[in-house]
Amino acid sequence: MSQILLRTDHLQAFYGDAQALFGIDFELRAGELVAIIGANGAGKSTFLKCLTGLVKAKPESVIWKGQPVGGRAPGDIVRLGLAMVPEGRRLFPSLSVEENLLMGAVVSRKGPWSLDRLYAMFPILKEKRHQPGTSLSGGQQQMVAMGRALMSNPEVLLCDELSLGLAPIVIREIYSAMPTITSEGMTVVIVEQDVSMARKVSDRLYCFQEGVVSLQGASADLTREQISKAYFGLATGD
Ligand SMILES: Nc1ncnc2c1ncn2[C@@H]1O[C@H](COP(=O)(O)OP(=O)(O)OP(=O)(O)O)[C@@H](O)[C@H]1O
Ligand SMILES: [Mg+2]
């Protein structure tokens, strides 16, 4: 099996006195595409934010290539090789498409991703490169957000709700880029509300429920019934 890149060990997270994550054990191997699903408020975004230093975590609860990195500053985490596509895209409104993309290269690691490479994957972005990023459609803005994260040439791409607010046809278009992204050996974590899409594109899946992992396994092995129980917290009766 390939190397474990990233692991969490009984990861807990708090907002003030309110606990959001209650001991998440998670692992990610090089080359995998792992999906995290779960209802609103389950803790999916908080989990990604702990991985990227946006929410505090104990050092030894997040392990990157054997090193404790929990609580490191977000910039340090990007330099290590983790980049996030944040929930809601968060483009810089005053910047053009191309300037938004270049912001991702502020931390510039060596790797295959460049403006040319991105424009080859998403030609519409080249066409619109001088327009304000926020003037684009939702799907195109999502492409910019993905492109911006790829511009740092991460080893791991963390995506929070790529499909949020997008029409099914646009969701399919966005996800059709995944094979190109993973073909270079990129390791990917997606948080996804669209459970059937999550199952379809991922190798393994974790379901979160109220800050704990309620189910995990190889995506192809998990049944719809197992997933809906874990997702909605229905009593199993056994
Ligand atoms: N900035 C914050 N301050 C206080 N509590 C927060 C904050 N962000 C999230 N929470 C709380 O932490 C818990 C987990 O929220 P989180 O956003 O991680 O869930 P999520 O699974 O990403 O949900 P969604 O599907 O709605 O994006 C929720 O109870 C939420 O109310
Ligand atoms: Mg979220």
Image: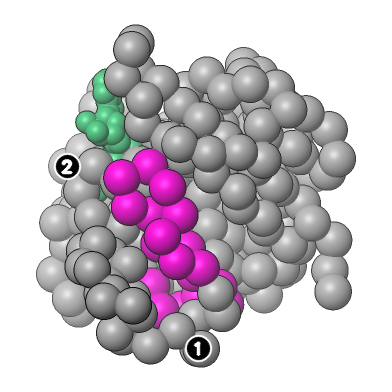
Q: Position of residue 67 (x, y in %)?
A: 83, 33
Q: Are marks 1 and 2 in contact (CB under 8 Å)?
A: no
Image side of residue 51 versus residue 144, left or right? right
Whether residue 200 is visible, yes or no, is no
**In the rendered image, the vertical position of residue 41 relative to residue 93, given as above or below:** below
Residue 135 is marked as 2
Give the position of the N terminus as an image quadrant. bottom right
- At a point 51% along the width and 68% down the height, the residue shown is 216
Q: Position of residue 71 (x, y in %)?
A: 62, 19
**In the rendered image, the vertical position of residue 141 relative to residue 228, given as above or below:** above
Pointer 2 local density, CA inside 10 Å: few below 14, some 14–19, many at least 20 = few
Whether residue 137 is visible, yes or no, is yes
Can you name the residue that lies furthest to the top here?
16
Between the residue at mark 1 and the residue at mark 2, the CA separation in whole angstroms equals 39 Å
Marked residue nearer the N-terminal end (1 or 2): 2
- In the rendered image, residue 223 lying in the magenta stretch gets the answer no
Query: Observer-nearest residue: 11 or 159?
Result: 11
Residue 220 is marked as 1
Query: Observer-nearest residue: 192 or 63?
Result: 63
Q: Position of residue 84 (x, y in %)?
A: 50, 41
Residue 230 in which image quadrant: bottom left
Give the position of the C terminus as an image quadrant. bottom left
Q: Secondary structure at mark 2?
A: helix
**In the rendered image, the vertical position of residue 32 relative to residue 9, given as above or below:** below
Query: Observer-nearest residue: 19 or 118?
Result: 19
- At a point 60% along the width and 48% down the height, the residue shown is 25
Q: Amino acid at mark 1?
A: Ala
Residue 98 in which image quadrant: top left
- At a point 67% along the width and 55% down the height, the residue shown is 27
Q: Which residues are magenta?
A: 198-216
Q: Amino acid at mark 2?
A: Ser
**In the rendered image, the vertical position of residue 82 relative to residue 231, given as above or below:** above
